[in-house]
Image (tube, grey):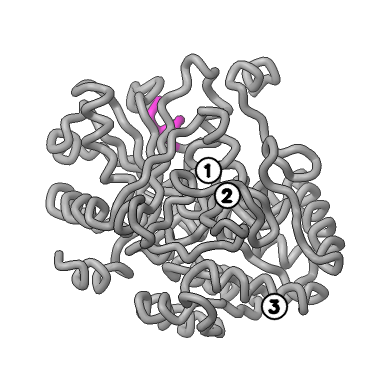
């Protein structure tokens, strides 16, 4: 993309200090700064090395199964009142989600840097499984931090991580969910930066992690643009993805932001977790209800109290109950380039059921938040509108959760 086109879009990436507008940065202890600087250099060098890029691309093709399929869901489109709904099937990737795109890239980078030990955090368990998978493939020691509540909710993925040779460390601080797992993982990394690589799973954390994760996920949107063009769709009317920390969403949105000028940009919509509702304390809607603040080494929108302390987030989805959002998403929200919409648990469960019965696809409960927005988009954009939606993962892991919800 040319600089002129980027200027027309009104969008640019992070600056040299890792800021997207006012958001981002690296708010970390002094002992971690050299490790982040080393990581930033190593990442830049790796992405400029044709051998690294070729190794990564080969694994994406032969191991993950990329490009992932683009499926036209005609029964779903008819039910919600749209002209066409195209599903980007990240659920068909090896390990069942988009997470493997990022973990393979980061674990390859760890090997390149001479690190033989990797750690990760996980909520829904998909990032933990994907990290354990990449670590097994590349012969790396792997430790995954996971909240005790999420261990209960996602027991199948916990078992998978063990099968893959990873150690799962329970975190019982706070609510025992994703935010607590991130805190524990970062605390551990501070103590072991010399020999340990932190495979961060979402587009958040201190610089350069938001950019690294985006770069290892942007093939979602790039492939979608090319696949739509093959179907004769030059431009969808809307592009939708679920947003927790924001990795699958930024991987989907970023190529569209870089491909189209502001006047041609499709409506980009991120579905965030409203939980029991944005008028309830049981919510995870950090854009709708949050204020800018610092957490886990970065500055972005956070759910916080009047003293700036992070609040506990809630969602039926273990992958979306995080009290903040990645800094690039915060910037895109402020710039008006992406619309972020809260979706409740009940709306997500209904959308989950609808895709199951209409298309024979069992989506992750995270992805179901994005699916829940389709009827409103049909009402806004009209019955001829074409929508691209990223199905970030499959729903095997969520069967017990939706059963508990009464489905």
Q: Mark 3 falls on what kind of element?
A: helix
Sequence-wise, the earlier of marks 2 and 1 is 1
| Label 3 with label 2: CB-CB less than 8 Å | no
Q: Is residue 45 left or right of residue 400?
A: right
Q: Mark 2 falls on what kind of element?
A: loop
Quarter of the image for the C terminus: give it.
bottom left
Could you say which is closer to the camera, residue 222 or residue 85? 85
Q: Which mark is residue 250?
A: 1
The residue beneath circle 2 is: 326
Sequence-wise, the earlier of marks 3 and 2 is 3
| Label 2 with label 1: CB-CB less than 8 Å | yes
Residue at image coords 30%, 36%: 86
User: Alpha carbon of mark 2 to alpha carbon of mark 1: how far?
Assistant: 9 Å
The residue beneath circle 3 is: 188
Asked if 249 appears above or below 38 in the picture, the reply is above
User: Alpha carbon of mark 1 to alpha carbon of mark 3: how far?
Assistant: 27 Å
Q: Report the span colored magenta.
A: 224-229
């Amino acid at each position: 993309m040319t600089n002129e086109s980027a200027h027309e879009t009104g969008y640019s990436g992070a600056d040299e200090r890792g800021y997207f507008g006012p958001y981002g940065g690296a708010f970390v202890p002094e002992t971690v700064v050299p490790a982040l600087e080393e990581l930033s250099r190593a990442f830049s060098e790796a992405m400029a090395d044709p051998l690294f890029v070729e190794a990564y691309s080969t694994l994406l093709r032969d191991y993950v199964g990329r490009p992932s399929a683009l499926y036209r869901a005609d029964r779903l489109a008819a039910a919600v009142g749209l002209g066409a709904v195209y599903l980007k099937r990240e659920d068909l990737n090896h390990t069942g989600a988009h997470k493997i795109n990022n973990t393979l890239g980061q674990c390859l980078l760890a090997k390149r840097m001479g690190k033989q030990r990797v750690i990760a955090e996980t909520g829904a368990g998909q990032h933990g499984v994907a990290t354990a998978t990449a670590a097994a493939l590349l012969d790396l020691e792997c430790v995954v931090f996971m909240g005790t509540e999420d261990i209960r909710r996602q027991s199948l993925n916990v078992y998978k991580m063990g099968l893959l040779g990873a150690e799962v460390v329970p975190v019982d601080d706070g609510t025992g969910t994703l935010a607590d797992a991130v805190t524990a993982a970062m605390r551990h990394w501070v103590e072991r930066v010399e020999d340990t690589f932190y495979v961060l799973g979402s587009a958040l954390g201190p610089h350069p992690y938001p950019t690294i994760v985006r770069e290892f996920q942007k093939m979602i949107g790039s492939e979608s643009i090319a696949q739509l063009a093959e179907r004769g769709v030059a431009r969808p009317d809307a592009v939708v993805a679920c947003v927790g920390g924001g990795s699958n969403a930024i991987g989907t949105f970023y190529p569209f932001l870089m491909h189209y000028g502001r006047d041609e940009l499709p409506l980009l919509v991120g579905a965030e977790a409203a939980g029991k509702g944005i008028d309830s304390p049981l919510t995870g809607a950090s854009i709708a209800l949050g204020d800018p603040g610092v957490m886990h080494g970065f500055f972005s929108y956070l759910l916080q109290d009047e003293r700036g302390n992070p609040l506990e987030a809630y969602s039926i989805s273990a992958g979306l109950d995080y009290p903040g959002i990645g800094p690039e998403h915060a910037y895109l929200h402020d710039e008006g380039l992406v619309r972020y919409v809260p979706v409740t648990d009940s709306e997500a469960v209904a959308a989950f059921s609808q895709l199951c019965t209409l298309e024979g696809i069992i989506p992750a409960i995270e992805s179901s938040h994005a699916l829940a927005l389709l009827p409103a988009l049909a009402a806004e954009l009209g019955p001829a509108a074409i929508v691209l939606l990223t199905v970030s993962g499959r729903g095997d892991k969520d069967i017990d959760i939706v059963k508990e919800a009464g489905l």
